[in-house]
Amino acid sequence: MQKKRHLWDMELLRFSLVLIQSWLTPVQYLSKVFTNNLVFGTSDRVFEKLKDLEEGIQALMRELEDRSPRGPQLLKPTYDKFDIHLRNEDALLKNYGLLSCFKKDLHKVETYLKVMKCRRFGESNCTI
């Protein structure tokens, strides 16, 4: 049972890492995509937070891997479909659609990490 839980935790961390890494490059382009002044500083802060998350997840994975054999590496999907040349409304809608995907992916990461934390630390008040 403990080994199965360990493998499941590693999978949750791998999925979380892939989602975070897949957004690093697109987030760097946010300031070029949208003309809103609020986006310029925000995209830099979001990128920094993603890098921090990436490092934290990698540290957790190293901690868990010290106790288990290495699993297969996942292929890293990317969301590099931002249209940085906003020529029409369709491109703008596509970019907002990608931001919606970004929000959903980060919600998944948050949920995966909460599940792992609840199982690891047996918190009685865990809600997802």
Image (spheres, rainbow, N blue to C red):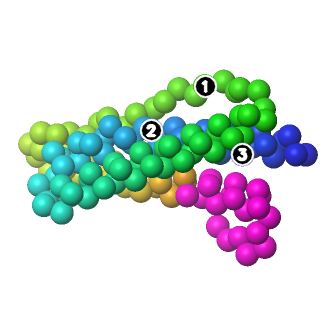
Indicate the amino acid at tag 3.
Asp
Tag of residue 21: 2
Ranked by sequence position, the earlier of labels 2 and 1 is 2
Q: Residue at x 81, y 46 (%)?
A: 5
Indicate the amino acid at tag 1.
Gln
Considering depth in this image, is 56 or 86 the residue closer to the camera?
56
- Secondary-structure class at tag 3: helix
Q: Is residue 47 visible?
A: yes
- Magenta residues span 110-128
Question: What separation in Å lies between label 3 and label 1 (alpha carbons)?
Answer: 15 Å
Image quadrant holding the C terminus, namely: bottom right
Ranked by sequence position, the earlier of labels 2 and 3 is 3
| Percent coordinates x, y for residue 108 in the rendering | 55, 54
Indicate the amino acid at tag 2.
Gln
Q: Residue at x 54, y 52 (%)?
A: 109
Q: In the rendered view, does 34 fall on the left or right side of 22?
A: left
Residue topped by disc 3? 9
Ranked by sequence position, the earlier of labels 3 and 1 is 3
| Percent coordinates x, y for residue 127 in the rendering | 67, 71
Residues packed near mark 3 inside 10 Å, few (<14), some (14 to 19) or many (20 plus)? many
Tag of residue 116: none
Residues packed near mark 1 inside 10 Å, few (<14), some (14 to 19) or many (20 plus)? few
Prevalent SS, magenta region:
helix
Tag of residue 73: 1
Considering depth in this image, is 60 or 31 the residue closer to the camera?
60
- Secondary-structure class at tag 2: helix
| Percent coordinates x, y for residue 123 in the rendering | 76, 69
Q: In the rendered view, does 112 fall on the left or right side of 99?
A: right
Question: What separation in Å lies between label 2 and label 3 (alpha carbons)?
Answer: 18 Å
Does the magenta portion include 127?
yes
